Amino acid sequence: MRSDEWNVVVVGGGAAGIAAALAAGRMGARTLLVERAGFVGGVSATLPWLGFHDQRYQRVVRGLAGEFVETLARSGHASPITLDPKCGSLAAVHSHYWKILALRLLREAGVTVLMHAVFVDTVRSHDRITGIVVESKSGRETITGQVVIDCSGDGDVAARGGVAWEKGRTGDGLVQAPTLVFRLGGIDDDAFRKACQDPAFNYREWLAPYPRLFAQMAEKLETVDTYVLGGFAGVVEQARRAGDLNVPQTRIVGVKLHTRETPNELSVVMTRVLGLDPTDVDSLSEAYARVYEQVPELIRFFRTYVPGCERAHLVEIAPMLGIRESRRIMGDYVLAADDLISGARHDDDVAMGGYHIDIHRPSGSWVSSTNVRAYGIPLRSLIARGVDGLMMAGKCISATHEAIASSRVIPICIAEGQAAGTAAALASLPGRDVRSVPVAELQSVLVDAGAELGLDELERHPDADSWPELPFEETKVAPDAVIADSAWLT
């Protein structure tokens, strides 16, 4: 039993949790990371990483996120960071080598990682969160910590600790549609690339109103092996009308991948469940049943209808459902869409983002997107309101339904985790509350660790001028295909 107190306790070993625990451990804080699975990485070990740059190709995320992907790239286990006109930038990451690297870095930093340990309750004394309760093969135990960081993705620590939270969009509470990601191998790179370069396939719907930008991007596809897909609506509709596809998605969504050991693969992000409640076990269980049924149907679709995919085969199904939105913990500041659209900066910014507001509609067949300017994420959005001793990072930070649709992507979550872990260490080592940590001191430590806070002018990618850049106010295009929502609502 762990009866002694930790400086920092992190719940959840996804991207944000890894970064929070690693940052705290490297600061010398006695740190425990609690993870319910048998590996660390969470959803970050199932997806390409999007959003190192904003849509003007300014670098908004550095620090640990950059260290991770650059370390993997040196050994051939990640692609170079590639620019993208909608997502800013992306990198393909070899999922298993990422899990190996993350665990090694945590152990080198002195972090204790508790695997197959399920968080079950929060310990609260008056207005202070003092620890958590976990269940494992060793039984039930209480773990105390000076600062607890909720990186559960679902705001579990906050919810069990009586801290205010919100979920879903205003009005009906529905969250963004989740996805079970899977990878296809055996892609004919040349044939698939040529289809993407053909305007008739409309592989990237955002570029359709701008023929010059599409031509520029088509030319870029000759020079990159990793790129985003968001289109092919006509092909999807053809399969639907022929009775060969019956899923709540009208576009091919995913990423063409390429690393040294995983060349010419597709990460398919097309499974969908509408009406999910990610905090309800019955709803989650039904969601898994539905998305697993969609996988073989989608594989047949790719083989039959998509050029270059005739010999595609299933490589891997992600070990967990990708939940884009769950509980959002209310903090001292609630990050809102206006902050993102205006590119707001705050005196206590400890991380940055620049990914578009990408809402996979809770009751719809496609996404809604709003462009943003490079924005700051304040420390106050990482501190739980009304209590001491509780911080958060990842998709459960203090933000609105719209704002979380940008700040939820992996590099930004890593930046939030690095900030939260650093702040927690600065607070716990001298035994003070997080709110009493001088912001200037925290920002200085983060900058020294390589984080990007926007304190100086942001650096544009050296190749930025040769890449297409979408206008901030984009032309709205009528969707190529729309399907009724009701058939898939749970």
Image: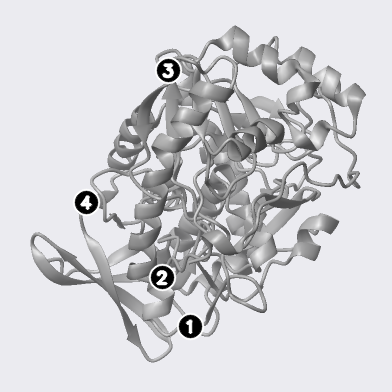
Give above or below for 132 relative to 258: below
* Circle nearer the N terminus (4, 3): 4
Amino acid type of disc 4?
Met
Amino acid type of disc 3?
Thr
Q: Position of residue 415 (x, y in %)?
A: 56, 48
Query: Mark 1 highlights which residue?
Result: 387
Q: Secondary structure at mark 2?
A: loop
Amino acid type of disc 2?
Thr
* Circle nearer the N terminus (1, 2): 2
Task: Give the crowd class for mark 1: few <14, some 14-19, many >=20 residues within 10 Å.
Answer: many
Q: Secondary structure at mark 4?
A: loop
Query: Mark 3 highlights which residue?
Result: 262
On the rendered image, what quadrant is the N terminus found in?
A: bottom left
Give the number of the mark in front: 4 or 2.
Answer: 2
Cα distance between the residues tagged 4 and 2? 22 Å
Give the number of the mark in front: 1 or 2.
Answer: 2
Cα distance between the residues tagged 4 and 3? 28 Å
Q: Which mark is residue 279?
A: 2
- Which residue is painted at 45% across and 40% down in the image? 181
